[in-house]
Image (cartoon, rainbow, N blue to C red):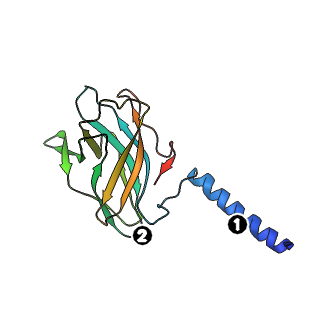
Amino acid sequence: MTMTARQVGFSACVLAILLLGLSLFGGRAVLGADGTPHVMDAWLRMPAVSGRPAGGYFIVHGTDKADALVSAASPKAERIELHSVVMQDGVMRMRAETRFPLPARGTLTFAPGGNHLMLFGLAADVKAGDRVPVTLGFQSGAKVTVDAEVRAVSAPAAKPMEKAHQH
């Protein structure tokens, strides 16, 4: 089958648009391919003191419908809590939360100094450089599992879009 010049030109335009999109997003889609929230840049910071909780961080991009993050679990942690950081009486305090709203097409960021996961009872065999599966549960019933990179307590936080995306 031979392609006409017009078909070749059209195909080249489509390819150029796809490549432009990939370069703009660094190979990352904003929404999960299956309509679930899209989670990227997931990582864990080891605890400063053995036996204490580890911190978990990531970015979630919402779908066309509002949702809420309501849970997190991992086979490598006894339990995981969702935490916010609030100013109370002039002091920054952590507080366990039951949900974090995720607006339609919005972004929810869990980062050092702000919203974060607290991973209690982290498995003794987890070390910096490992990847730990973390499943995030949403009010809609969607579940997204990511492999979070484990970093040493002294490691600096990555800039967003630095690591490969995950669904």
Q: Is residue 63 left or right of residue 21?
A: left
Direction from residue 166 to residue 139 in the image, left or right: left
Q: Residue 64 carries which label?
A: 2
> Badges 1 and 2: C-beta atoms under 8 Å apart?
no
* Spatial separation of the CA atoms under disc 1 and disc 2: 25 Å
Q: What is the x, y in percent for residue 17?
A: 67, 62
Image height check: is 63 above or below 144? below
In the picture as drawn, the residue positioned furthest to the left comes out as 89
Q: Which residue, given by chain and number where applicable, does mark 1 sit on?
A: 14
Q: Residue at 36% x, 50% y: name it.
A: 109
Q: Is mark 1 on a helix, strand or loop?
A: helix
> Mark 1, residues whose alpha carbon is within 10 Å: few (<14), some, or many (≥20)?
few
Residue depicted at x 80% and y 69%: 9
Instruction: Kindly identify the amino acid type of the residue bearing the numbered disc 2.
Output: Asp
Q: Which of 6 and 130 is in front in this view?
A: 130
Please state if 14 lies on the left or on the right of 46 as rendered.
Answer: right
Residue 122 locus on image (x, y percent): 28, 35
